[in-house]
Amino acid sequence: MKKQNVGVRSCGPLFDDGSEEIFPGEGEGGSAVEADGGRGDDAGGVPRLDDFRRESWKERESYRAAPGCILGELASMSSDLQAACFMLAVRGPWRDWDKTVPAGTTINIDDEMLKDSGDKTISALMGLKERIDELLEGFDE
């Protein structure tokens, strides 16, 4: 089987600052909280609980935006699969039928028609599209 390079679209950097560092300051040898509690006052060096709180990965804007981006990519992939399967069908099992259809004719083709085209490749790709659509429907609920 011939290997093929496939382009992957990116949803952007993992985190707002473009890094993959979950807890800034860790691993650098030292504490991110200063001796005075990080408040810049002289409260006797007793830090507040908020001084230790780090932003949760679920609170980051880049994380909250990522699922929507990924779902959008999957929806686009589903549509692209359907279009690719149609092009395969008119070049393969539907070739003779395609020659009889006048230019400009509007035709409604559904997923089942493509899946039942008689071509194993088209049927398998339409099965993948169906699974993607089921996954997307699960997120709509």
Image (cartoon, helix red, strand yellow):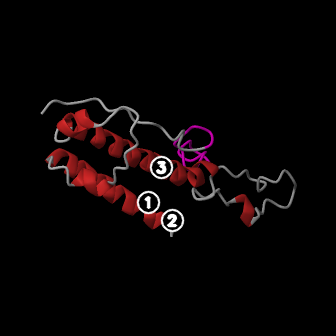
Name which residue type carries label 1.
Leu
Q: Is residue 138 left or right of residue 125?
A: right
What mark, if any, has residue 140 been given in the picture? 2
Q: Who comes first in sequence, dot 3 or dot 2?
A: 3
98 to 22, vertically: above or below: above
Mark nearest the camera among 3 and 2 is 2
Disc 1 is placed on an element classified as helix
Q: Is residue 5 magenta?
A: no
Residue position for label 3: 70
Disc 2 is placed on an element classified as helix
- Residue interval drawn in magenta: 16-31
Q: Position of residue 9 (x, y in %)?
A: 45, 36
Tell me which corner region of the image, top left, top right, bottom left or bottom right, holds residue 105.
Answer: top left
Residue position for label 1: 136
Q: Residue at x 33, y 44 (%)?
A: 81
117 to 11, vertically: above or below: below
Between 107 and 137, the one lying in front of the other is 107
Q: Residue at x 21, y 40 (%)?
A: 97
Marks 1/2: CA distance? Answer: 7 Å
